[in-house]
Image (tube, grey):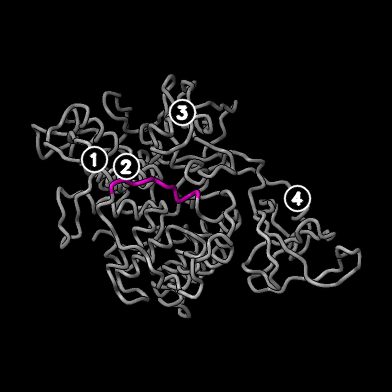
Amino acid sequence: MSKKNTVFFRLPFLALAVLLFVPLIACKMPNDKVLPRNQSLPLFNPHVSDFICETEASKVPPIDAQAEDWFLAARALEDPEIFVEDRDYKKIVALTRQAAERLHWKAMLNLASLYVEGRDPLHGEEEAVQLVEKAMRLGIPAAYDRMGTYYANGTGVNGDITRAYAFWQKAAQMGNPQALGFLGEKLTAGKDYPGAEMWGNIPVAIKMMECALGQGYGPSAYDLSYLYVVLRTPDGTSDGERTTETKERALQVLHTGVRLGCEKCANKLTIEFGDPFDLANMLVPYIDKARAERYGVLSRELGFNPNARFPNLDKVVPLPPADLPPWNGDRDTLLHAAMGVRPPPATPQPSASSLLQKPYFLAADYALRPTGLLSDAPTAPFSAYWQPAKGQGVTEPARLFSEGEEFRHFSVLDAAGKSRYGPVTWEQCLTIRHNHAAVEPRAARGLLREVARPEPLLSCACGQACPVSGVWQPWVAADHPLQAIVNQYWRQTWLTQGAPFPRPRRDWLLDLPDGEVTWHLMDASLPDLG
């Protein structure tokens, strides 16, 4: 059953920034008396007539910037280059827990995995299930996917594959790319084979996997390549015929998969270019041992480090008919050229909050943004910076409260103008980057290569032709609902002068108008592969 057969899986550590605020009060379960693990869900239906693509990034709670840094620091400590027995799991758990307490949703799910792994002696499978349930109450699609995996494996719950598929179906409907990729692959059979957990619904399978791929989930590219390579009727039926156009489409999606970290895609292209199984029906236009060698290097790296991404793949191995740039044969040279880049971080200037004492202190790297989330509870519902909401006559700077910490009382005037001493309404404040909205993609250490900022700074719209060869980064406004899957280093791309910029709907399969995306030059250095 693919990844669902494993005891658990860890989320990829893609860097996230601040999302549009999603009111937590709107994410309660329909019946609070029923534990989320026990909720009633519709049974999995593999024969749905259509599928509407939703995006997970538009549904998750906002990401606190300071929590994101803790999360990325924890993920860096799990670098594959560090032997498992040499990793500081005490620190990894502590950092992940800090981030999870700020409702960093990926940290919450990674902390659950650490509990299941036995990395924290005081917490185990039951605590992992409870943490996933907390994430489910926040409306996090990936939490439903994880609960499905727990039911499939009997992790903290009684094993039940029927319930597992119901949770995976719910996660897919909410836009979780892992669930979309998994269920999409299950619908690619020519006809139903329930015993093998395979069903025939190829039109919906394609939509599901395209939805996953559009959100950066590389493994779906591998399965899509088999569906793209042959002509199909609207009902998904194939006569097995391959055309130049269908093979080109399959080749393009495999190449995209490599950019997004799909090891199987890189391995398939290694074989196709180097030693195809069927010379009479090969996918690529011609044998090319040089290209095969480069895909082989990328495939082996992804096998070792599944978290690697190669957004600037076209810099080192563009698809035919483009010529290959010279390469000295050194593995690291190739990998470094294909990976994402970032400018050196700016030195933050002191802010008013950074000059205060705890609990009002906030490091100069961050600023605060009120979220609109209000609480009348006597204690903080979760760890965050909180300040008295406006309109109460209280001027108090935001301060850090731990979950369950008692809110302060104040003397305020009531509606009748009389003074009273007591509780007030509090508003959550989110930490954001104190970098004046600079274009600075983030990732765990080792996934990005630092480069000098190009001078002058160049920005372009989607409809323009690329004015300068180099690495370009797409970017949308910080409050855009899709910023968490656009403002990412793995969206970067190497473009040559005069080439068109990628179009979100055409090239990313995202329902995102061109006009909402701006491209920024990150690195103008020409390919140097030794």
Label 1 vs 3, first from the N-terminus: 1
Element carrying mark 4: loop
Q: CA distance from mark 2 to mark 4?
A: 42 Å
Residue 401 within the segment the image draws in magenta: no
- Residue designated by label 4: 351
Label 3 vs 4, first from the N-terminus: 4
- Disc 1 crowd rating (10 Å Cα; few below 14, some 14-19, many 20+) is many
Q: Looking at this view, is 439 or 399 the one in front?
A: 399
- Residue designated by label 1: 225
- Residue designated by label 2: 257
The residue mark sitting in front, 4 or 1, is 1
Q: Looking at this view, is 350 or 333 the one in front?
A: 350
Q: Quadrant of residue 9?
A: bottom left
Of the 4 image quadrants, the one containing the C terminus is: top left
Q: CA distance from mark 3 to mark 4?
A: 35 Å
The spot of residue 77 in percent (x, y) is 47, 61
Instruction: Evaluate whether residue 520 shows in this view.
Output: no
Tell me the number on the disc at residue 470: 3
**Amino acid under label 3?**
Gly
The spot of residue 427 in percent (x, y) is 70, 60
Q: Quadrant of residue 309?
A: top left
Q: Is residue 490 left or right of residue 49?
A: right
Q: CA distance from mark 1 to mark 2?
A: 10 Å
Q: Is residue 386 left or right of residue 50?
A: right
Q: Is residue 231 left or right of residue 140?
A: left
**Amino acid under label 2?**
Gly
